Structures are given as C-alpha cells and as structure tokens.
Image (cartoon, rainbow, N blue to C red):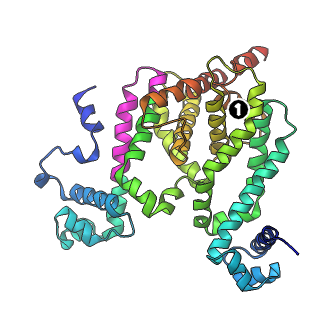
C-alpha cells in the first residue's frame, strides 16, 4: 500500500500531519467535539465543553463556527463521513479481485462504524438519532448514498448496471449486520466477513452479473 | 369474564382503532379508555408508562400481526424460491397499503423506530425458522451451511421489505430476478444460469 494510503487508514486520533499547536483550529474543534461525543453522547455535549476540550475560548469557537453548537455538530458529521469514506476508498481501491472488494468494503466499513467511539456512545445515549438513519425511507436514502459511493469500485469487473446492483447488495449485507448482530457473522473479523462473502455475497453477485 | 391477556388485546385493538380513525397526535388516553370500555386507571394498570407505553405496545402488536398475515399469505407456497418471492411482494404491498403505519411514519417516526430496531433480531429469527423447512427440501449448493443460509435469507427479506431501494416489487419478473441472484445465488446450485439457458 502507498505511504499516503497508510496515513488515510490510520484511526482519526492519529491523523495528525502537524503538531497539535499548528493544526488548524477548525479541525481541533471538530476533533474535540468527537471526543466529547464519545465521552458523554450528544445531549450532554455543550459548546463550552467542546471549546474547553479543544483548548480554545468560547469566543474563538464562535468566530470559527458562528452557528455555534449546531454548526460544530454539522462539521463533525461532514468530517467524520469524509474520513470514513476516504479510508474505505483506500481499502476497496487496493483490492485486486471482486471478492477482495466485497470483503474490504463490508469488513472495513462495518469495523469503522462499530469501532467508532462517538457512534458507540451515542448508540446508548442518543439511540433515536442513530436509529433514524436505518429505518424505512431514511434507510432507502442511506443505502442509496452508500451504494453510489461503492459502485465505481465494482466497474473493473462488472457492467455499470451490475455494478450498481452489486454495490447496493453489499451495502445491504453490511447494514443488516450493523443494526442486528448475530453469532454467525462478526464484521470486525476479516475471516468471518470472507466466509460470508464467499458463501452468499460473491455467488449472488456472480448470479446477477449473468442477468445484466 | 375476560382474561388479562384478552383485556390487553382488547385495549390494543381499541387503540389501533383510535389511531386509524383520528391519527396519533389526536388520540388521547381518554379516547382509548372510552373506545376500549375501560377506566383510565385500568389503562395505567396494563400500560404503566401511559400513552407512550401504549403506542409502543400497539406498534409491536401490529408488527407481529403483520408477520402473521405474511405467514398466511405464503404458507401455501411449495419451493424456497416461491416463498421468498411471494413474501416480498405481499409484504411490500402490505406496508404500502398500511394506513396506520404510514400515518405513524409520517407523523411521529420516532415512535416507531426504537421498537422496530428492538424487534429486528427476534423477527429475523422468526423468518429464519419459517424458512428452514423450505431450505431442508432443497438440494443446496456444495458447502452451503443451512443455518448460515437461513440467517442470511432472513436478513435479506427484512432489508428489502424495509427499504426496496431501486427495486419495483409490483413487477413479479423483477422480483424473480432479484430472488434468483442476490437471495439464492449462494444457496441453490446456479439457478440463474440454468434459467438463462432455457430462455
């Protein structure tokens, strides 16, 4: 894997290209907010705590984020999503076969979400927010967004229509195991995901390939 | 003299009727008590958490009834492929036509969500159990583990029922294509290629 790729696969806390003092304050504040969310969830996280944890004054925080708490939280979602998808892109982009694309996507995507400290805390403190994205119309939207991201990684092996179907299928498999965990599959284990992919996902994709 | 369980059922039925008639926000505990012919005190005895408790119980109750209806719709099917195809079409139609469910989803989606997520595991187990005899009757692909297969199929059923994505479940041909590949590609020995050759 290229050196740049290694940096992208590091956990968020280690993504420090410069010493702390030189890091742009915006990122400092966003990371502090993620740490607060991981510690105590959404409802208890105030602007004051985010500022204190980032080591900046309340005034500085409002200068960088005039919208206050809401604006910081929006930036958190955008930043974390960008980090999530860029790490996933590195993992899926370096795959050399369709099996590897499927394993990389489901394993890395699932592991990042299951191991995300802020998401884990919020699953307990603010479940309704997490649950919102995986129900009904919102689930359709979530699946479509993720499938649009994953689709290009399949085009090396599949026609465009089949790529879309394969991407949506893989996303569904991952989301299903994220929201409802069982004994047979562990998304954080690459070997377990590979068994799942070889058993059901890859043969499903091979079969749909013949239809498109 | 009705048993406790029957009375609870009657209260849930009455609540459901109120929700269907006037919507979630316009349904009060008094309305429910009146419709069920019980006192407010009785309501609180059965549902100590009050209105939220009752609404959440109705959602769970209706959710289970939905799967019972689904079961009745597919029980005549003979093959694994048929049972999944029919189940998907019937479930999709039932959700689309379900006025109370749609109303709750539009009005106070938060009411439904924790319940549905809490029900996901038990529901998957139910679907997996239901599919077992159909799987046992089929000749499975080499190396296909029947327990993993039924869990996988149950997950896919739930996924496509809750979020149809780009699939049109009103088109039986489309559903057939989906079931033969995404669902059964790893479970039955190459059903698709055989079909394609026949065509």
Q: Secondary structure at mark 1?
A: helix
- Provide the residue designation for mark 1: B179
Q: Position of residue A46 (x, y in %)?
A: 31, 71
Q: Going by the image, does A86 lie left or right of A181?
A: left
Q: Position of residue A50 (x, y in %)?
A: 26, 66
Magenta stretch mostly in which secondary structure? Answer: helix
Q: Is residue A91 magenta?
A: yes
Spot occupied by residue B17 in the image (x, y as percentages of width and height):
80, 72
Q: Nearer the viewer, residue A161 or A139?
A: A139
Q: Is residue A197 above or below residue A124?
A: above
Does residue A20 show up? Answer: yes
- Which residue corresponds to the image point at 80% horizontal and 72% vertical from the top-left? B7
Q: Quadrant of residue A59?
A: bottom left
Quadrant in the picture for residue A83: top left
Q: Quadrant of the C terminus of chain A?
A: top right
Q: Is residue A100 left or right of residue A72?
A: right
Q: Is residue B164 visible?
A: no
- Asked whether B61 or A55 is in front, the reply is B61
Dot 1 crowding, Cα within 10 Å, few <14, some 14–19, many 20+: many
Choose top left, top right, bottom left or bottom right for residue B159. top right
Q: Magenta stretch? A: A79-102
- Outermost residue toward the top in this view: B197
In the foreground, A181 or B70: A181
Above or below, comparing residue A106 to residue B13 in the picture: above
Is A99 on the left-hand or right-hand side of B142? Answer: left
Residue A14 at x, y percent in the picture? 22, 44
Task: Tell me if residue A134 is in the magenta stretch.
Answer: no
Label 1 resides on the chain identified as: B
The residue lying at 74 percent from left, 61 percent from top is B62
Locate the N terminus of chain A by quadrant. Answer: top left
Left or right placement of residue A68 versus residue B126 in this view? left
Which residue sits at x=45%, y=63%? A126
């Amino acid at each position: 894997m290229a050196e740049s790729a290694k940096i992208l696969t590091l956990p968020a806390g280690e993504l420090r290209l410069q010493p702390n003092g030189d890091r742009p304050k915006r990122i400092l504040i966003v990371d502090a907010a993620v740490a607060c969310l991981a510690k105590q969830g959404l409802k208890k996280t105030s602007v004051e705590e985010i500022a204190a944890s980032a080591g900046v004054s309340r005034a500085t925080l409002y200068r960088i984020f005039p919208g206050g708490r809401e604006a910081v939280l929006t930036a958190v979602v955008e930043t974390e999503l960008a980090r999530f998808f860029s790490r996933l892109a590195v993992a899926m982009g370096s795959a050399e076969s369709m099996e590897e694309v499927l394993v990389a996507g489901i394993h890395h995507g699932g592991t990042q979400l299951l191991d995300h400290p802020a998401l884990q805390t919020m699953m307990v403190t603010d479940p309704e927010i997490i649950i919102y994205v995986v129900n009904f119309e919102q689930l359709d939207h979530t699946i479509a967004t993720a499938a649009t991201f994953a689709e290009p990684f399949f085009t090396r092996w599949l026609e465009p229509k089949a790529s879309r179907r394969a991407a949506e299928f893989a996303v569904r498999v991952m989301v299903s195991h994220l929201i409802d965990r069982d004994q047979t599959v562990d998304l954080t284990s690459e070997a377990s995901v590979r068994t799942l992919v070889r058993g059901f996902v890859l043969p499903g994709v091979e079969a749909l390939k013949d239809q498109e | 003299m009705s048993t406790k369980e029957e009375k609870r059922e009657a209260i849930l039925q009455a609540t459901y009727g109120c929700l269907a008639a006037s919507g979630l926000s316009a349904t009060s505990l008094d309305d429910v008590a009146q419709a069920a012919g019980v006192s407010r005190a009785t309501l609180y005895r059965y549902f100590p958490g009050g209105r939220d408790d009752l609404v959440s119980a109705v959602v769970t109750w209706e959710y289970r009834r939905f799967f019972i209806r689904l079961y009745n719709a597919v029980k005549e099917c003979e093959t694994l492929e048929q049972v999944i195809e029919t189940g998907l079409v019937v479930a999709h139609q039932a959700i689309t036509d379900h006025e109370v469910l749609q109303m709750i989803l539009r009005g106070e989606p938060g009411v439904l969500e924790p319940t549905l997520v809490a029900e996901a595991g038990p529901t998957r187990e139910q679907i997996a159990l239901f599919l077992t005899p159909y799987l046992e009757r089929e000749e499975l692909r080499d190396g296909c583990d029947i327990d993993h297969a039924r869990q996988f199929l149950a997950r896919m059923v739930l996924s496509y029922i809750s979020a149809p994505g780009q699939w049109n479940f009103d088109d039986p041909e489309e559903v057939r294509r989906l079931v033969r590949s995404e669902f059964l590609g790893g479970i039955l020995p190459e059903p698709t290629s055989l079909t394609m050759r026949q065509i």
